[in-house]
């Protein structure tokens, strides 16, 4: 493969890429991609849509096992781009929003002792904490908020609508820099969502 050239498209291309990944994967979850520094081998015709659907050469990737395999070797670098990374090659892909969706939320404990755990659509399970914080971005389409959680490296998952509803159910008020906020506690840390006065206006 010549550096900078697009990776081969079509069924044979994705099958070959998957085969190379399987030969290098240890089958124990995400690979240690942060430690690898392979050469850039061009962009691959792969896209992760905002709704979490993976596409290759314009067609959805229907096999969940293949999606999870590709997800295990994703890395977002400091240049803001997302890559599939192996010890010997790095291929660029397109991500419309973030690569993962947080599809399930489980809450244990109450108040400041509460611990929130999220499961992604590709099988990652993370506890919301200092290393896996929540963030909230403004949604220009509905004037609302889009919640995200840091999963690993620089890779984030956006909470689905149902997971967001569950998150709100776990919320409470707390003071941040002397101001009342509505947010959630998890792993001993408070994650503010919206100022309490703004919540009252909406209510």
Image (cartoon, rainbow, N blue to C red):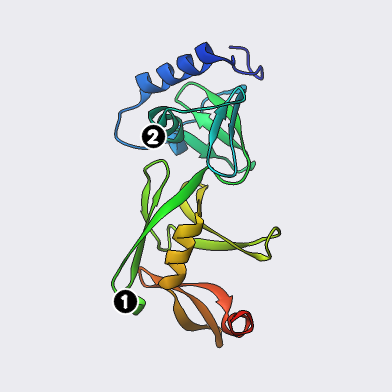
**Which quarter shows the C terminus?**
bottom right
Which dot marks residue 31? 2
Q: Dot 1, how many residues are within 10 Å of its Cα: few (below 14), some (14-19), or many (20+)? A: few
Task: Answer left or right for 77 relative to 85.
Answer: right
Q: In this view, does 96 lie above or below 5?
A: below
Rounded to the nearest whole Å, what is the CA distance between mark 1 and mark 2? 34 Å
Kind of element beneath mark 1 = loop
- Tell me which label, 1 or 2, sits earlier in the chain: 2
Q: Where is residue 7 in the image (x, y as percent from the top left)?
A: 60, 17
User: Crowding at label 2, few (<14), some or many (≥20) Cα neighbours within 10 Å?
Assistant: many
Task: Determine the image quadrant of residue 26.
Answer: top left
Can you see residue 106? yes
Q: For the view shown, which residue lies furthest in the right direction?
A: 140
Residue 154 lies, in percent from the top left, at: 52, 47
Are circles 1 and 2 on residues that touch, CB within 8 Å? no
Q: Which mark is residue 110?
A: 1
Residue at 45% in and 30% down: 70
Q: Left of 177 or right of it: where is 102?
A: left
- Nearer to the camera, 182 or 62: 62
> Does dot 2 land on a helix, a strand or a loop?
loop
Residue 133 appears in the rendering:
no
Identify the residue at image location x=47%, y=82%: 173
Relative vertical location of residue 23 with respect to residue 137 in this rendering, above or below: above
Residue 116 drawn at (x, y percent):
36, 64
- Position of residue 200 measured from the top left corner of the image (x, y, whole percent): 59, 85
| Quadrant showing the N terminus | top right
Instruction: Kindly identify the residue that appears in the image at 45 percent across and 35 percent down.
Output: 71
Tag nearer the camera, 1 or 2: 1
Q: How many marks?
A: 2
In the depicted view, which residue is nearer to us: 189 or 110?
110
């Amino acid at each position: 493969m010549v550096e900078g050239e697009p990776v081969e498209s079509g069924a044979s291309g994705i099958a070959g890429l998957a085969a190379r990944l399987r030969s290098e994967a240890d089958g124990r979850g995400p690979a240690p991609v942060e430690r690898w520094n392979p050469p850039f081998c061009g962009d691959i015709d792969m896209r992760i849509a905002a709704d979490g659907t993976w596409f290759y050469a314009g067609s959805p990737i229907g096999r969940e096992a293949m999606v999870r395999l590709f997800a295990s070797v994703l890395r977002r670098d400091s240049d803001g781009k997302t890559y599939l990374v192996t010890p010997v090659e790095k291929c660029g892909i397109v991500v419309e929003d973030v690569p993962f969706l947080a599809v399930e939320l489980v809450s244990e404990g109450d108040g400041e002792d509460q611990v929130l755990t999220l499961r992604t659509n590709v099988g990652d399970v993370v506890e919301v904490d200092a290393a896996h914080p929540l963030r909230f971005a403004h949604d220009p389409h509905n004037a609302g908020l889009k919640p995200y959680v840091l999963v690993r490296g620089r890779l984030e998952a956006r909470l689905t609508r149902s997971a967001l509803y569950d998150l709100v159910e776990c919320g409470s008020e707390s003071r941040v820099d002397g101001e009342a906020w509505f947010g959630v506690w998890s792993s001993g840390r408070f994650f503010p969502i919206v100022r309490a006065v703004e919540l009252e206006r909406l209510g």
